[in-house]
Image: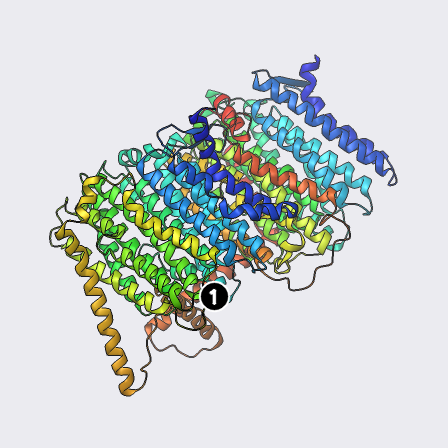
Amino acid sequence: VSFAALVAVATIAAFAFPLFLSACMAVRALRPTAARLAPWAATPALVLAVSPHGLGTVGWSWALLGVRLGSAGPVTSGFLFVTACLWLASGVFARTYLAEDPARARFWGFFLLTASGNLGLVVARDVASFYFFYVLMTFAAYGLVVHAGSPEARRAGRVYVVMALAGEMLLLTALLLTVRAGINAGIEDVPRLVAASSRREIIAVLVLLGFGVKAGAPLLHMWLPLAHPVAPTPASAVLSGAMIKAGLLGWLQFLPLGIVALPIHGLACVVAGLVSAFLAVALGLTQRDPKTILAYSSVSQMGFMLATVGIALTVREAAPAAVLATLFYAMNHALAKGALFLGTAVARATASGWPARLVTLGLAWLGLSIAGAPLSSGALAKISVKAAAARGAWGALPLPLLLSLAAVASTLIMVHFLRQTVPRPAERRAPAGGLWIPWASLLVLDVVLLVWPGVARAELALLVRPDKVWAAAWPVVAGVVVAIGVARLRRARDEDGGRAARREVPAGDVLHVVELALSRVRSAARTAESSAAPLASLPDRLRASSALLGDRLLGWAERTEGALGAFATIGLLFLVLVFVVLAGQTR
Amino acid sequence: MNLHDSLPLVVVLTSLVPGVVIFLLTEEHRRTRTALNLVAAVAKLVLTGYLVWGVGRGRSYETRIPFLPGADLLLRADSFSLLFVTLSAVLWLVTTVYAVGYMEGASNRSRFFGFFSLSVASTMGVALAGNLLTFFLFYEMLTLSTYPLVVHRGTTESIRAGDVYLRYTFLGGALLLAGVASLYALVGSLEFTEGGALPVEVAEERLLLVTVFVLLIGGLGVKAAVVPLHGWLPVAMVAPAPVSALLHAVAVVKAGAFGITRVVYDVYGLRFAHELGVTGPLAILAATTILYGSVMALRQRDLKARLAYSTISQVSYIILGVAVVGTLSTIGGIVHLVHQGLMKITLFFCAGNLAEELKIHKVSGLRGVGRRMPWTMGAFTLAALGMIGVPPMAGFVTKWYLGIGALEAGEPWVLVVLVASSLLNAAYFLPIVYDAWFREPGVAFPVAGRRAEVSLSLLLPTLTAAALSLAVGLFAGHPLSPLGWAKLIADREFRP
């Protein structure tokens, strides 16, 4: 058996093994075996990710619209590596975490299906297969979001599915506009096709918005702080670590980066990304639930990555460096954020003594890595982003400074998270191995990510250069100082005059406003129908009339339908009309 | 007439003869009836397979019987007719098995299965018709043979539904006859010809040709349930489940859509129709129907009614694909003939299973039903996702081709219609899927008296249909998939 054949098998098994296991979960007799293997479902993908690449692709022209799979190129192998690691760690974690859950069979079914979609979309080398795996992941993840069955989970599920569907439709439109009469296209050809299209501006907008839903781009992020926290912890880890990156991977693969510059789109991305990086932190700071805080932190971090994609879109020459920077940033964030999510449960299972200290230390390190503290993978990620940014001229926009300030914000939210999470002394116990081992593995992986072959030696050297160390250190120090200062102030105020009520922005922020507006419209419609009382303000009247109009239209459609059922009218009219015309003709 | 040339006639007769024989059997001859049905259905399937093989290799089969002066009865197996014949043959077998299980213990089963076979024979005739006259004859025969199926239960409601059905279809028949007769008067008998059958010298009679086109489409549009001629379809829902499946997935609505395709491509010719300016309005009509059907489906509380409106919407995808001028949209349209058939028959089988086993008719009664009937709801979920256009189901392939075809033809507005329709489909199917799988049952369901969740003669056809609607999408790239065959048709016959 040749090496190439082994790689081909691993490529297929990367998505097929989890898919097969999830099918087995449906059959009662196979369920115990499948459940035992389920935690290890991502193993073939990991094997593929660490094996040498460049061995071409496997494909079947008869499947779907011509399936091609492969894992060549730094972007694919990098994403595949972290995705597989996260699914593996979460799988092992879930085995212990959900050991007592009565609905764990259903959880595993959806978990495996989602894994298959997520791993498959990374190895997909043609547009149609990519879309298939992407949709598979989206729909299957719904089962993870609503797993708890609580009203919050259901609400999160509803919001998730509505927004995901909208995103999918934008994406479908973008893909159709891209492939055109070719029916299907190789992923590697997509940037060129988009660049050559006369509608490339529209395509780029659709791609940015379509994947933006998954990647938590600002205003499209509403589902994220709802859905990520309600899912069981191992599912949150993959949602916020791996699946959110599928949107980013989409941006990297479907935008014409490095071929044409789209400065308007690019600048919009940079601005939106930076806004997101700050605003999500501000919103996250009002939260209490550690997982919600982490979800907002994810939105903020994805803002960084969106800004980097924006850099690549704006400056054609900066694109290769920006893509690699985004890639490394994404890998670091995936591992660290996955570990942080798992860490919330590890911390809860740990009480005091040296395990608690170790867990605190680990979580603190992860927080520092996200914030970009010196010598961490996060620092390297931020250095490469700044290096890419330096290749473009940003006019009045002080981009490097803003990025550093965003790092201050990252530090703030991480401190806030740690305050809400670190183990508090209660009873003496240590977490089960099934929980802390996968958590610690991700932690270690995040540290050793620095020696990942995609990182150049020269870049590693940058990490210890004094000016870079300072550039990485001051935002973190500033963040910690501000956090401590705020905490002191608050404590002083609390001691002064009792606890002032703290404001908490409802998770999902903008969504709350939208829902409020919708319910106002509905109640206005009810008022307008029930009472003839004149409505005072113009907005009230507008709301009422728009709601009434909607009701009237539907009512009208229904009445037409009734009239058609009676038939006599329309059919005869039509017949008469046609014969009149015909008679006029034949004369 | 040699044996090869009589094959199209034999295909029709394999359902016609058993139908007649079944009428002669008494109610008690259950085994004979079932055996006869199954043998005929399998024989037809084998025969169809042989024809597909032959046509795939470039042969053609033609039965010609003198009928009127200057107008023969013509049955011809070309690649497009075989697409419809194969679909009908496969689904006839599946539906027969289902119907045998579903009608277990019902009265008047001889009458039921007799007319059932007759309507399949008519569908075969519609598919194989080689000219407008033959098409019209079988089209009317289809009306007559499906009416007894609609009113089979004999309740006041079903008699009323039958009345509505007859009024609509006879009106359609009248319009169609007027159209066929006008064309006959103008140019004589017209055999379906690739690229259009109209001779060049009549091309000047534009207004007349437009009028005739409206007549033909009006007549065919009744069966294809194009808005505003769709009123019969939701009413006909009172029929037993296998009949609804047959009406909605295979025979009746498809006969209409198939006929419209024939008229556009093989009578007028796509280029000429486009030049006459009739394809644009047809596309708008189809788009309206797609959206209107979906919106109405959203409002339905009854499961079968929701499926009926969904049919109205989905069948117009075929018409839309035909009316948008371009090869890729044509492929998308004609392949949906098969795709919609497979997905919709799955959904109706599921609705039948739910009604038969748990007496569930309302959408609201589906809460938690996934745990009681996992296989049925699994099939339902697959088919519903396919309707939304989720890959790798059949519906995805259709949408992909229709979307690209619309862009190729320079009509990007079609994309908006497709996206809106997908979202509406999601809005009326996903809540059902959610209720079935993720909610607790409102009432305790009766426990199954056997090992399977519902009797196997109902479950197996359901699963087969679901597996087929998955397979045709998953293996769409294979030359023998419906998509592969549709490409062959577009390549051979429907070059615009």
* Horizontal side of residue A356 vs B218, given as left or right: left
Please say whether residue B72 is visible from this viewpoint: no
* Horizontal side of residue B343 vs B283, given as left or right: right
**Furthest-top residue in this view:** B2
The kind of secondary structure element at disc 1 is helix
In which quadrant will I find the N terminus of chain B? top right
Name the residue located 36 percent from the left edge and 67 percent from the top edge: A422
Residue A287 position by quadrant: bottom left
**Furthest-front residue in this view:** A354
In which quadrant will I find the C terminus of chain B? top left
Residue A160 position by quadrant: bottom left
> As shown in the figure, which amino acid type bears the numbered disc 1?
Glu
Q: Nearer the viewer, residue A219 or B91?
A: A219
Percent coordinates x, y for residue A430 in the rendering:
45, 63
* Horizontal side of residue B473 vs A539, given as left or right: right
Percent coordinates x, y for residue A497 in the rendering:
28, 87
Please say whether residue B242 is visible from this viewpoint: yes
Residue position for label 1 = A152
Label 1 environment density (alpha carbons within 10 Å; few <14, some 14–19, many ≥20): some
Question: Circle 1 marks a residue in which chain?
Answer: A
Percent coordinates x, y for residue B476 in the rendering:
51, 32
Q: Nearer the viewer, residue A548 or B204?
A: A548
Percent coordinates x, y for residue B219 in the rendering:
58, 38
- Number of residue marks: 1
Q: Nearer the viewer, residue B447 or B333?
A: B447
